[in-house]
Image (tube, rainbow, N blue to C red):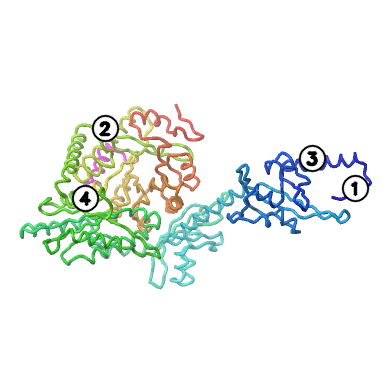
Amino acid sequence: MRKIKSRPATRISSEYIRLHAILDSLNEGVLMYDLSGTVIEANQAALDFLSATTKEEIDLTKKGLNATFEVCTVDGIPVDVEHWPVWRILQGEEISNIVLWVRNKRTGRRWISSHSGKLLRFPDADEACGVLSIRDITESKTAELQVRESESRLKSAFESFIDQIIIVDQQLQPQYMNPAARKAVTSMSASEAVTFWHSTAKDAIRSAKPVVHEVQCRSEFGLRDYTVCATPLLNAAGTVDEVVILANDSTEKNQAQENVRKAALHDILTGLPNRALLYEHAKHMFATAKRLHQQVAVLFIDLDRFKPINDIYGHETGDKLLRELADRLRSRMREEDIVARFGGDEFVILLPEIDQHRPPHVLATDLLRLISKPVGIDGNDMSIEACIGISLFPHDGEDIDELLRRADTAMYSAKASGRNEYRFYTDDLASYSKTQSHLEYELKRAIGAGGLSLAYQPIVDIDTGKILCAEALIRWDEGTVGPDIFVPIAEMSGLVGRMTEWVLDEVGREQHFWRQHGLPLIPISVNVSPVQFKLRGFIEDIERRLRDQKLFANLLQIELTETVVMENAEHAIRSIKRLREHGIKVALDDFGKGYSSLSYLSRLPIDKIKIDKEFILGFSASNSSRAITDAIIALGTALQLEVVAEGIETLEMLMYVRQQGCRQAQGFYICKPVNGELFAKNFLEGLVLLGQPGHKKKT
């Protein structure tokens, strides 16, 4: 440092103390060190920052720095000590706001800091020293990185959408276009490509509310129909900054009527016969076989671990895989054989005229080998396996329902013994069938003898804690299995109709009881099985109950799964419209778990979607689950649907979906399912969620 010759020592001392006091008052650390790395001065913030009590503990030599600290860029790239700010300054470089990750090896503390400084030279004294300031910016930088990551996830979700997504400013200038929107520009005239959504966006800016329009525009493929939804993004002042535009090509919707019978009897995705056509073929095939004293084999094929493919690669890839597998199965069939798609990842094959030249187990072995061959889709090689159960007409049964049940039993036996296996239905599986029959008998008794009950789980407004409705969940009081077991048994045995009627009766009785006791009423949602929903008299039964005032439309909601809706979309749309005409809300349950597409979702006249709880439960460990959750919330909001997050088990989950714009939630963190009496006692009197931050139950 400069030598001060003329000032008295006491004055120098007082100035030094004053200067040091000023440095100690700073929030950022300041270090002064000589060319060898020895610290000359360090303010209190620097000592605290570097976990030292005196400046002598700070060793800025290369050896000392390497022994004490690890340094890397914000992207995680390690930095050699020669390039650390301390030594860059000693090499004569002036640095400003160099941001690095730093870890103290002794204490384990890790932080992000900003470094600035330069080398000071004192020619008169022939001395030089480095001055370095350090600021802890961990909190602000982490927030910035999180925002950047969130934006990247949202962009990735948008990039995967098959619909056009465009974000425009107040002057309708595009700020972002996803690949679908950019691709559309090449197929439309220049003017129409950038203006067909203008009217919708203008209305959204004018009203500051979401707007949906049906528009048409010309492309190289002819006249196309679009459903355009424009959602304004408001700033803190409540004015519109930008508008998010979702343009869904709805042309195919208007063309679907051209082939009604094919749509009714064939699977839309694969073109294979669906369940209805399978039953029709089986009826004629069994009659012929009985007359000619022949056998017919029923092969029930179930794909193993198909859902992870949907979760990882997306439903579009999963659909491509199903189409490829359908083509492979078709390639092995004779003209008289029937291969049908039975469900999401299930296929059924009917083999007439089987003999020693074409035994079903030989075909099953060939099909398992064929299915397990890798499939190349969009640059990804995917492998999948299957299990096959086989039953024989007339040995194992004389109607298709019985034969399917027994083939299904054999298939599960194959799964239990290992992957990529086949099994015949044999007497060895009789005990399993007897167990199923016993459960069916006991369930039938329980339905008639009051052995069932309902539990209610509330769905709440996340912001206010107010209970919006409750889901009715069926329980078998003395049963040994849960609803995941006995509901499918009811469906297979034909008991599901009586069970659903009981549920509706119980919901109506409970609501009348609450009304008589002066308790405020809320809507109750009822799960309707695929089998029951497809019955011709289901809607008429609901309408009769409304006429008899056993149920009230504003207090009833119906929950359907994606599978039941997509198996026969036209029937589902007609039925849902009839329910909604009466004022009954309809929800799509376990959304994302099935195989619906965005184009079909836009067609469905539903009121809400419930995010499948597997995505909620998995988002903390899976970026794909988090991205899918974010995309579903954004999509539901864009389509003006209520979005419910199921499976909320922690406060973290609740806060996350709230931050993403989800307004309704359900799960064990909020409340476990409880019986009607306890539900009324704990919740209906207050209608405010217990345990919700900022809310207390009314008493």
Examine the structure image and report whether residue 552 is included in the region drawn in magenta: yes
Instruction: Tell me the mark number nearer the camera, choosing from 1 and 3.
Output: 1
Residues drawn in magenta: 534-553
Q: CA distance from mark 4 to mark 2?
A: 27 Å
Residue 579 picture location, percent across and down: 30, 47
Q: Amino acid at mark 4?
A: Asp
Could you tell which of marks 1 and 2 lies nearer the N-terminus?
Answer: 1
Q: In the drawing, what numbered circle is on residue 481?
A: none
Q: Which residue is mark 1?
A: 4
Q: Which residue is mark 4?
A: 408
Give the CA separation, mark 1 to mark 2. 93 Å
Q: Residues within 10 Å of mark 3 (few under 14, many from 20)?
A: few
Where's residue 656, x and y in %? 49, 45
The residue lying at 40 percent from left, 42 percent from top is 647
Question: Which callout, 2 or 3, points at the residue further toward the start of the chain?
Answer: 3
Q: Quadrant of residue 364?
A: bottom left
**Residue kind at label 1, given as amino acid type:** Ile
Badge 1 vs badge 3, beta-carbon distance below 8 Å? no
Residue corresponding to mark 3: 21
Q: Earlier in the sequence, mark 4 or mark 2?
A: 4
Residue type at tag 3: Ala
Question: In whole angstroms, how far apart are the C-alphas of marks 4 and 1?
Answer: 97 Å
Asked whether residue 222 is in view, the answer is yes
> For mark 2, what is the residue?
477
**Element type where label 3 sits in the image:** helix
The percent position of residue 315, horizontal first and vertical second, equals: 37, 57
